[in-house]
């Protein structure tokens, strides 16, 4: 069964770090370009990072040099290391393929950056 499951969110102070994980089923993950997305209250969902099968990554300008996306193809898992977190990074974070497959959106994981 095709599935995606995000984890690792939480409450962190400005300047802090979090590492998100995305566990995917093999049918989704294998060979796919994957992406991390986020949706802040009152805003549309946006792509923040993407990574192709062989590891080349790209980032939204707002997170460049602070976030690092990686993947472990043997474990069908993608990660997002977030450093230097800012209040404006507060959002629900989702993973999906890139471009996304509509029916695969999961619950996401909440990241709150606040003092």
Image (cartoon, rainbow, N blue to C red):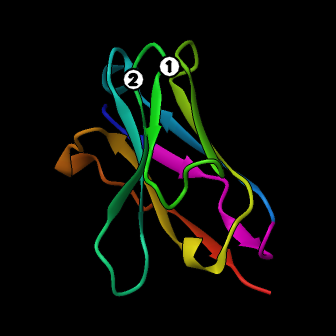
Where is residue 32, by image quadrant? top left
Where is residue 77, by image quadrant? top right
Q: Nearer the viewer, residue 110 or 17?
A: 17
Q: Is residue 43 above or below residue 26?
A: below
Q: Nearer the viewer, residue 47 or 107?
A: 47
Callout 1 environment at 10 Å: few (<14), some (14 to 19), or many (20+)? some
Q: How many marks?
A: 2
- Left or right, 68 with respect to 35, comes to right
Q: Is residue 16 above or below residue 88?
A: above
For residue 86: magenta? no
For residue 9: magenta? yes
Which residue is labeled 1 in the image? Answer: 55
Where residue 70 sits: x, y (%)? 58, 30
Where residue 102 sits: x, y (%)? 18, 50
Residue at left offset 31%, top offset 31%: 1
Secondary element under disc 2, as helix, strand or loop, is: loop
- Left or right, 78 with respect to 83, comes to left
Residue at left offset 58%, top offset 19%: 75
Q: Nearer the viewer, residue 83 or 104?
A: 83
Residue at left offset 31%, top offset 33%: 2
Q: Is residue 53 above or below residue 49?
A: above
What label sits on residue 70 in the rendered view? none
Q: Is residue 94 above or below residue 35?
A: below
Secondary element under disc 1, as helix, strand or loop, is: loop
- Left or right, 56 with respect to 86, comes to left
Which segment is the magenta one? 5-15
Residue at left offset 50%, top offset 23%: 76
Q: Nearer the viewer, residue 71 or 25?
A: 71
Q: Are marks 2 and 1 in contact (CB under 8 Å)?
A: yes
Which residue is labeled 2 in the image? Answer: 52
């Amino acid at each position: 069964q095709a599935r995606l499951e995000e984890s690792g969110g939480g409450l962190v102070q400005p300047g802090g770090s979090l590492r998100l994980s995305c566990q995917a089923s093999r049918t989704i993950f294998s060979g796919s370009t994957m992406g991390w997305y986020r949706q802040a209250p009152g805003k549309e969902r946006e792509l923040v990072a993407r990574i192709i099968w062989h590891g080349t990554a790209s980032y939204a300008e707002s997170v460049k040099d602070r976030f690092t996306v990686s993947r472990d193809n043997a474990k069908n898992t993608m990660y997002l290391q977030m450093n230097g977190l800012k209040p404006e990074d507060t959002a629900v974070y989702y993973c999906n393929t890139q471009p996304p497959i509509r029916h695969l959106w999961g619950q996401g994981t909440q990241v709150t950056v606040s003092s």
